[in-house]
Structures are given as C-alpha cells and as structure tokens.
Image (spheres, rainbow, N blue to C red):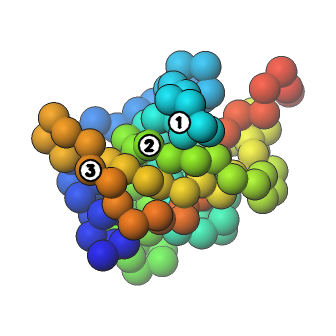
Amino acid sequence: MIQVAKHAALLVLAGSLISSNAIGEEDQSQKELGDGILVGQGVVCDTVQQVARFTALVGNSSDVEVAVKTVNTEVNNPLACGVVLAAFVRGNDVTEVRAAQQPMKVVEITILAVPVGDQWHFVSPLKQYAAFPVTGVEI
C-alpha cells in the first residue's frame, strides 16, 4: 500500500520536474497548513544515501531528471527517488550534504497525502528523505 501511494504520486507528477534551485526550498515550494503539516513539491528518496547521491549528481549536472534516473538505476528500483507533490510532516535533520557549493540538510519527512486528479487523498504515512538548503549559508 505504501509503495502504491508513492507510485501514484510519481505518476501524477511524472511530467512536472522541478529545477535544482527549487529542491526543498522552504520559501518558494512549501506552504504550511498548520499543525506542522506542509505542502511542497520536490525530490524524495527511500534512503539517506539515495538523497546524498542525488544531491551530488544535481550539483554536478543541474539536471534533476537525469539525477533521479541515475540513482534509481544504480539501486535497481525505478521508484527509489522521484519528484512528488505531497502534504507531509518534517521530521529530524539526519545529515548534511552538498549540492555544488550549496550545503543541504537531509531531512526525514513523513508523507500524509498526495494529489490524485484535483483531489487530495490521505495515504498510509510514508517515511521518505529530502534535501533542504541550509538557509543563510552559501559558499
């Protein structure tokens, strides 16, 4: 059921990839609904290592679609990483990585709902990982 929800979200958004500048960018791609629930669009992965690999690839090529496909091919799972629009709760910061010269926090998130057509559907809570820019820090 959990992978079905993620698969549905990936199918809905398959054609709407975002630029590397908008990955997890809190000011522009997230809106808070209250009670700690956020709505945002970005790349999510099953593991911290996959997010780290994705951010390294994006930092070198700036091509989100190629980076997602590369990670998914490397781990032999076409759904390991993907671009999703979801309602989620932000969890703990896990580690920091770099995308080019931008430090990023890898954060555990829990996806609660995804859009299907023009309606939002609750899903079984799904733990994923995403990279968010470290605000106020650029090198």
Q: Amino acid at mark 2?
A: Ala
Residue at (74, 41) in percent of width and height = 104
Q: Quadrant of residue 95?
A: bottom right
The residue that label 1 is drawn on is 38
Furthest toward the bottom, the residue is 76
Say left or right for 101 vs 30. Answer: right
Q: Quadrant of residue 135?
A: top right
Q: Amino acid at mark 3?
A: His
Q: Can you give x and y, in whole percent of width and height, for residue 65 in the image?
A: 38, 47
Badge 1: how crowded within 10 Å, few (<14), some, or many (20+)? some
How far apart marks 2 and 1 lie (CA) works out to 6 Å
Question: Residues at badges 3 and 1 in contact (C-beta under 8 Å)?
Answer: no
Q: Nearer the viewer, residue 107 or 60?
A: 107
Q: Can you give x and y, in whole percent of width and height, for residue 71 in the image?
A: 48, 65
- Picture disc at residue 59: none
Disc 2 element: strand
The residue that label 2 is drawn on is 87
Q: Amino acid at mark 1?
A: Leu
Residue at (54, 39) in percent of width and height = 37
The residue that label 3 is drawn on is 121
Mark yes or no: residue 103 visible.
Answer: yes
Question: Residues at badges 2 and 1 in contact (C-beta under 8 Å)?
Answer: yes
Disc 1 element: strand
Q: Nearer the viewer, residue 78 or 11?
A: 11
How far apart marks 3 and 1 lie (CA) works out to 15 Å
